[in-house]
Each structure stands twice: as C-alpha cells, then as structure tokens.
Amino acid sequence: MILPITNGYSSLDTGGPSEGKDDHVRDVFFRILGPLEAAVRGKPIRVGRNRQLTVLAALLLNANRVVPVNSLIDAVWRSAPPATADKQIQTCVWRLRNAFAAAGAPVDLIETEQGGYRIRLDEEDLDAHAFEKAVRRARELTAAGDLESASAEYQRALAFYRGQPLADISGPLTYAVAAHWEERRFSVLEEWLDIGLTLGRHAELISELKPLVAEYPMRERLCAQLMTALYQSQRRAEALAVYRNSRLAQIKNLGLEPSTGLQELHQKILAGEPIAPPPAVVAHQPWPGAKVPAQLPPRIKDFTGRRDLLQRITSDLRAGGEPRVVALAGCGGTGKTALAIHAGLALQQHFPDGQLYADLRGHTDPVHPQEVLNGFLDAFGVPEQRIPAGLAARAALFRSITADKRLLIVLDDVAESTRYEALLPSGDSAVLCTGRASLLKIPGLTEYRVDGLPTDEALDLLASLTGVERVFAELDSARRIVELCGHLPLAIRAAGARLRARPHCTLRSFTDRLATRQDRIAELSIGSLDMGARLDSTVEQLSPLAYRLWLRLSMCDVDSVPEWMASAVSDRPGEDTQRLLDTLVNAHLLTVTQDRAPDGPVYSFNPLVRDHARQRAATEFGALAGQDVVDRIALAPSGREGAAKVPGALIRSDKECTVYGTQAV
C-alpha cells in the first residue's frame, strides 16, 4: 500500500466526521514509515477513526511542510465545521502524538508551528519513495537488457501495494492522491507484464491478466497483453473473445471502436500470423523528473444512468482541433462531479499525456487559479524553483508545457468569478468543468444541464444501495422515495444510507416518515451526503432580492409559476423581476418549463429544493407569510386571467384561494 495509510481492516464508518466515543480506536499499521516501523518494533499504532486518520493523512501528504489548521478543518468537515473545530483538531494531534509515543516513535515527530502542524520525515521514510526508486532501477535494468533482474525489481516495487490507497478515508483530500497511485500501479504493472511476455512467460501471466481485464475491459493495453498471452499459449478462440468483449464494452460505454493497435493485433490473430513480443523499453522522458499525471479521483462503483449524456460529453471531448471545453451545470446534489469523473476515466486512453484534476471549491472556499496552476506544474515534475510567482507567468509556462500534449483537465465546482482562462491548456487538449451556476458566458464552451435522474435510473441507484430485492418488494414505496428525493442522486444516496443502516425498516414506513416531516431535507442528509449544505452554499451566493423572491415563490402552492405570479410576490417592477428570475434559473434553483403562459415563461421547482426553501421561509418570514403570498397573487392584475390559462395556477374565489379545488397553504 502506498501513501499514506495502510490498513488491513475493513473500511471505516463513513457516516460523518464524528469519531463516536473517545475510546473508540482501531489498530492501524503505518508501514509507510520505514525507520518509524523499526522504532515501534512492529507494535500496532492505535489511532481513532475518521478525524485522526484524516488529520494524519493530511500531515503525511504534506510531509515536512506546515499544514495550516484551516486546511485540516476543511479536510475533516469540508463546508460545515463546528464552532470548536480548531480545538478538536488540537485534540486529534495530541492523540496522534500519544499514539506514536506509545508505540515508541520520536516525541517530536509531529511539530507545532505557527498556524498549523508539520510531521517530520526523512526522504526515505515513505515507502512511496522506495516504490519510485525500485521502478527507476527496473527501468534502468530494462534499458540495459537485463530483463530477468528488471522483472524482479518491478515485482519488488509492486509489492509495496498492500491494498487500495487511502481506503479508510473519504473526501476530496484523498481522492486525487488515491487515483494517482492507483493509475501509477497500473502503469508499472503493465510494464512488468510486457517484460514477462518478452521473456515468454505467456501461460504464467494468463492468471494475472484475466481478472484484471474482466474488471477493466476498456484498458486496451491489458487486453492486448491478455490476447497475446492466450494466442501464444495456443488459445486462439479465447484471445478473440477478449477482443470481442473489449470492443463491446467500448461501444456500449463510449460509442468508440478499439484503437488501431488493438484492431491490428486482432487481425493478426484472426489470420494466424506471428505476433512479435512487446518492446520492453521505457518511453523517453521529456525532461528529468517529468511525469504523466493521473489525478482523476477513483470511479464511483455504483454510478448509475446518464448514458446518453455521457456519450455526448465524451464525443465532444474527443473532437479534434483547438482545446475543447465542456461544462456540466446543475444544482448541488445532481451528481455532476461523479459524471465528470466517470467521463474522464472512460477517456483516459484518449488523453495519453495525462489527466489533471482540481476542486476549485467555487461555492465554499474558492481556490485561486495561481494555486491550481502551481499544483498542475508540480504534477508535470516542474521543480519548485522553476515555477514563477505571478498568475500570468504560471499560465504561460503551463501553456508552453502542454503545447504538444493531449491532456484532459477536470475542474470541479467552478464559480462564475473564477479566472478560468488562466487554467486553459494549449495543444490538442480538453477541459471538463462542473458548476452550480451556468458558465455559458465563457467563450467557446459547450454546456449540458444536469438534473435529477429519470425514475428508472433513480430506482436502480436506490436498489444498488439498499438491495435489489428490498426495492422491488416495495416498488411503489421506492418510487415515492425517489420522488420525495427530487430524483437527486445525493438525496437518494442519503436515503439509501439511512435504509441500509436500518435493515428491518420497511420502505413504506420510511416513505411515511419522509412525507410527514416538515424538514425533509434533514432526513435526507447523513454525514458528507448533506443536501442541505449543498443548497445553502448556493443560496448564500444570491443577492438579498433574489433570495427573498426565491423564498416567496416556494410558498406559491402550485406546480408551475408564471412570470406574472413572480411579479406579484416580488415587490419589484417587471424588468427587475425578470432579472431576478434569470439569476435563480442561472443558479439552477428554478427551472424554465416547456409550458408557456401568454405573457411569458413558466418556472418550476425541484420538489426537494422547494421543500428546503419553504423551511427557510417559515423560519425567516413567520407563519403569516404564506397568506400574504396568496393575497398578493389574488390581487395581481393578471391573477384571474392568467390563473385560468396556466396549469396548476392559483384561482381566486370569494373567500379562499384554491389550486384546482385544493385549498392553498
């Protein structure tokens, strides 16, 4: 296992940042610390779950550098830290020091610095360094023609992996690191397999390759290696079946045929022609220390649906020419990040010079493009002393480095205020963005709106979380659950987590609980699956007038809100109201429906978003606000005439307002 936590136990509880009882600890072996392991004489280091592990990971990922307390708080709680967060971080560090000291580690291993903490390690203390050293040695032996020794050195390097990197920690802190080391393992594994094929170990390698290809059918280099091993072992039919399965997977997921190289190998096997062993050579590095970054977070295994949208995205990103920019926009919780990562990983082979990833935190704690560029340049192996200080200079260096490359850059949570242009690469590269507000003002951008899942896909997601049999035994209740979740993937995941934690709870009883709770969104938030926090961070970006209009519109007990109704409750002139409505649509807090009233567009809420807005309105406006909204609509000049023409609009009778016969509230 590489970097920075290895754990032989099952994953930690990811229900939230809470550690539970103070005495709840688990045994974790930190094999990444060479001298430290000798110092502790093999004794396990007992570390509390979640918080302490996350703090330790942040320190190790920045070994010998001061990690500010604010960064540690962000790593543990993200967007909703408690008031005592700094004190809790201090307690975590104190407990870590005690845990290391109890195992025999140096007392000054973790140092307190101004504004943060630093863990002191020698360069050889992390086995990530030992891994890279072994890989360099293996490549040198390969270049020298000593393939037997090179194979042994590759195996020694791969032995450092003792499980999935950072498996016990969730959150953006670890996603990019885990993805990098997972891709790094694959690239080194493929180099070792090439050497094995060159040495004629075809039969031995089949058992290594089969499970890998079964799990990663679109990884063409593995497929080619398995096809070669089978064909050279006189198993031609199986080699052809591997190609067929890989081709079907690529067409289904990407709409692409296999690469020319794989097709040529297939034709040689069909014709019974001899196959030359793969060239066991290492690609020339453009400069000492240069890297091929692979920063995309790992794939979400239960990713569901979006097939048509995924195909359009990947098709746009594959198109040739100038750098392509595709944006995914939607309110928080629609699964934009998961979709972007899924698309990026599906296109890894199309961008052989690397994949870069940055969470810009546009709606919480925005990251400056200068800091992002520093990370990108570091990912390409640019020495720190060669990275210029200013934004313009860094952007120019980044464009120079990427001029002859084919890269994919994924920028997550981009805000309208981001100085986005500085992050654009040169060359035949592509950029995939996500944002909660529309980014169409950026020139040359193609934008796709990401909304809730269709019912069938939403049910599939719920079934993947709670069990297929459980969902289809109460299918009507399951449909009602996804409806109450607004078909939003984040809310459905929270509902699935709740149900999974309550195996004896029926879906019907859970549905009844959701339907009767005023603060429904609180029931659909658990740990990091916090729909309320996502919406709040978006709402906080609104102007006071737009926010007030959003709350008032939520109290209109109708399915669709025509423009005249919005004007009636806004207290603003018509043009001002239209601009406020545009702001809400741009932030994906309202949707323009396909229906159209005689005097303008018609707007609608996602049901869960409206529930959240109503809860805030009740708190901020009081119990009489709803009647005030009803009265304003009824007295509006367009009220009687417009209501008669808009489906679901309010109709005024002598003493009450009704929605097609149902009393308005």
Image (cartoon, rainbow, N blue to C red):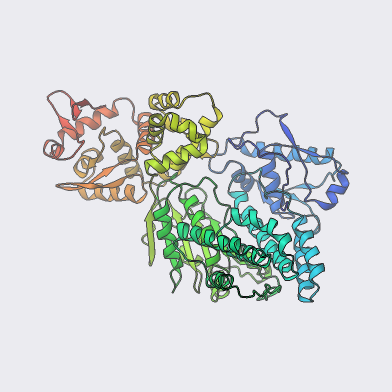
Q: Say if 288 sits above or below 178 in the image.
A: below
Give the quadrant of the C terminus. top left
In terms of depth relative to the viewer, which is nearer, 111 or 340?
340
Tag count: 0
Q: Say if 219 sits above or below 631 in the image.
A: below
Q: Is residue 73 left or right of residue 517?
A: right
Q: Say if 318 sits above or below 121 in the image.
A: below
Q: Is residue 202 left or right of residue 319?
A: right
Residue 205, horizontal then vertical, whole percent = 71, 60
In terms of depth relative to the viewer, which is nearer, 152 or 453?
152
Residue 46, located in which quarter of the rendered image? top right
In terms of depth relative to the viewer, which is nearer, 235 or 473?
235
Residue 425, horizontal then vertical, whole percent = 51, 70
Residue 627, located in which quarter of the rendered image? top left
At 66% across and 43% down in the image, what residue appears?
168
- The answer to whether any part of residue 133 appears in the image is no
Residue 272, horizontal then vertical, whole percent = 60, 73
At 79% across and 76% down in the image, what residue appears?
144
